[in-house]
Amino acid sequence: MSHPGPVTWDEVQTWPDGAGRYESFAGVLTVTPSPTGRHQLAVAVLLDVLRQAAPPELLVLPAPYDWWVSPTEWYEPDVVVFERSHFDPDGPLRTTPLLVVEVTSPSTRIHDLDAKRTAYAAHGCPAYWIVDPEVPSLLALRLEGTSYVEAARAAGDACFEASQPFEVTVVPAALRER
């Protein structure tokens, strides 16, 4: 597909649904295929865990829900946590979330570990978790300055106990169940 210049968020909103997941990194459009069942199960279970632990002033939402940075830059994390007061029921999130979670798939693993990590840090998201449902594992990153450092790592039945953006315990192996 050829396109003159950067793709904008408003333009993509006019495209038909179902052609894939659209994200833009400084005007460079990325389209990824629909996720696998294993991916979606991990998202659903993690969503339940986070929603049960989240304080009432925070909102936890799954994709598709865009984090809009600019007309030519937006992301669609698998799970996003942000202040409830910033929720727009008719539009994207226009402030930096407190936590973004990406659940890797074979088609997104490299992008989640590299480009998204760099972009989310550049836009000041304080916490980024990368969940690999294949292993299963969870890598928790926290923002220090302008880049992420490893805060914790858990695999299998090991417990990951988060304090940011709120206290919650996640067991990576449990993200494959239910």
Image (tube, rainbow, N blue to C red):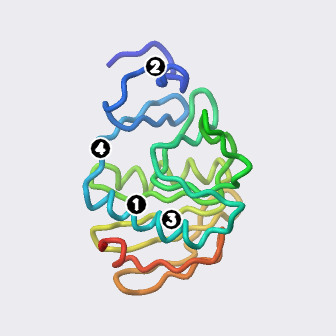
Q: Mark 4 or mark 2: which comes first in sequence?
A: 2
Q: Residues within 10 Å of mark 3 (few under 14, many from 20)?
A: many
Query: Residue at label 1?
Result: 43
Q: Mark 3 or mark 2: which comes first in sequence?
A: 2
Residue at point 32%, 67% (across, down) = 133
Residue 76 horizontal/vertical position (percent): 49, 44
Question: From mark 2 to mark 1, how far is it between C-alphas?
Answer: 27 Å
Assign the N terminus to one quadrant of the image. top left
Assign the C terminus to one quadrant of the image. bottom left
Q: Secondary structure at mark 1?
A: helix
Query: Tag 3: residue type?
Result: Trp
Query: Residue at label 4?
Result: 34
Left-right relation of 160 to 163: left
Q: Secondary structure at mark 2?
A: loop
Q: In front here: 110 or 96? A: 96
Query: Tag 1: residue type?
Result: Val
Residue 13, compared with residue 171, is above or below; it is: above
Q: Mark 1 or mark 3: which comes first in sequence?
A: 1
Question: From mark 3 to mark 4, how far is it between C-alphas?
Answer: 20 Å
Q: Mark 1 or mark 4: which comes first in sequence?
A: 4
Q: For residue 14, which numbered disc appears in the image?
A: 2
